[in-house]
Image (cartoon, rainbow, N blue to C red):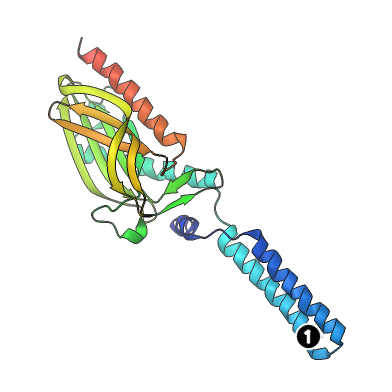
């Protein structure tokens, strides 16, 4: 099965509680017992038919809703797809080459579970994995590139299911214009797709003279894995180190 279809199925599949399958088999057994008790060929046939039907139904339920790609493979695919997006696109949009860089390119990723211009609301999905953490079909991708004299940024919204990105934006600023960089709890006013309000969120923040870059990375309602937060923390540490060097 094609990779995009497997990702889509994972997000759209509803968890089927095992008790439903047990219920189907119990009903089948009851029908069979009734058939034997009445000792009529019609009742026995009905019982056997019910067993066969429930078995087929149970198999269909399992293969369609339970036999899904694992969370580990899903996470691997996401990292692979994001790396594919940022391999060349940020440099092309910024008009720089990798030879212009003086340090490792940094990546900050954040979940999106609210209305975003340009996206069909049906594509904005969130689902909890078996590990207890949520995965998201739409994400914010923020890239930082260090050149000798200035810091470049590239941002887009990524539709993972369709492997497309929109709302691209770029910026560049001198190191001296960076006021602060940190991960912090911020006030937010997003209404999530499930109707919940996003009030206080963990976020990556880069404050500039007259501008600001913010990427929400986590919240109690979003419940993302530590991977997104760790990318933001790594970016903060690296940008601070570069600023200390450049502002000497």
Q: Which residue is mark 1?
A: 45
Residue 112 visible? The answer is: no
Viewed as shown, does residue 103 lie left or right of 48? left
The image shows residue 2, relative to residue 81, as above or below, that is below
Report the number of discs: 1
Q: Secondary structure at mark 1?
A: helix
* Identity of the residue drawn at 40% across and 36% down: 228
* Identity of the residue drawn at 67% across and 72% down: 56
* Residue found at the far left of this picture: 210
* Identity of the residue drawn at 29% across and 46% down: 190
* Identity of the residue drawn at 24% across and 56% down: 118
Q: Position of residue 13 (x, y in %)?
A: 51, 60
The image shows residue 246, relative to residue 99, as above or below, that is above
- Is residue 19 or residue 75 the one in the foreground? 19
Viewed as shown, does residue 107 lie left or right of 34? left
Q: Quadrant of residue 207?
A: top left
Q: Quadrant of residue 131?
A: top right
Q: Position of residue 205 (x, y in %)?
A: 27, 30
* Residue found at the far top of this picture: 248
Q: Position of residue 150 (x, y in %)?
A: 18, 24
Q: Position of residue 114 (x, y in %)?
A: 31, 51
Quarter of the image with the C terminus in it: top left
Residue 108 visible? The answer is: yes
Q: Quadrant of residue 97?
A: top left
- Is residue 189 or residue 40 the one in the foreground? 189
Disc 1 crowd, CA 10 A, few/some/many (<14, 14-19, 20+) = some
């Amino acid at each position: 099965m094609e990779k995009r279809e497997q990702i889509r199925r994972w997000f759209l599949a509803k968890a089927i509680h095992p008790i439903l399958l047990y219920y189907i088999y119990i009903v089948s057994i009851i029908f069979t017992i009734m058939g034997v008790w009445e000792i009529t060929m019609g009742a026995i046939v009905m019982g056997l038919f019910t067993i066969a039907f429930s078995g087929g139904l149970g198999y269909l339920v399992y293969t369609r809703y339970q036999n899904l790609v694992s969370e580990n493979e899903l996470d691997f695919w996401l990292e692979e797809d994001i790396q594919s997006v940022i391999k060349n696109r940020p440099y092309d949009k910024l008009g720089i080459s990798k030879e212009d860089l003086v340090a490792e390119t940094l990546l900050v990723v954040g979940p999106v579970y609210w209305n975003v211009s340009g996206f069909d609301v049906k594509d904005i999905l969130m689902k909890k994995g078996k590990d207890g953490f949520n995965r998201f079909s739409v994400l914010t991708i923020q890239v930082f590139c260090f050149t000798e004299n200035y810091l470049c940024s590239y941002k887009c919204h990524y539709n993972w299911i369709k492997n497309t990105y929109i709302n691209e934006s770029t910026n560049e600023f001198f190191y001296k214009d960076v006021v602060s960089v940190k991960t912090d709890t911020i006030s937010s006013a997003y209404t999530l797709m499930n109707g919940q309000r996003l009030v206080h969120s963990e976020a990556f923040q880069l404050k500039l003279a007259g501008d600001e870059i913010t990427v929400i990375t986590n919240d109690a309602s979003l419940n993302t894995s530590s991977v997104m937060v760790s990318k933001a923390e790594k970016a903060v540490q690296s940008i601070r180190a570069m600023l200390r060097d450049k502002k000497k």
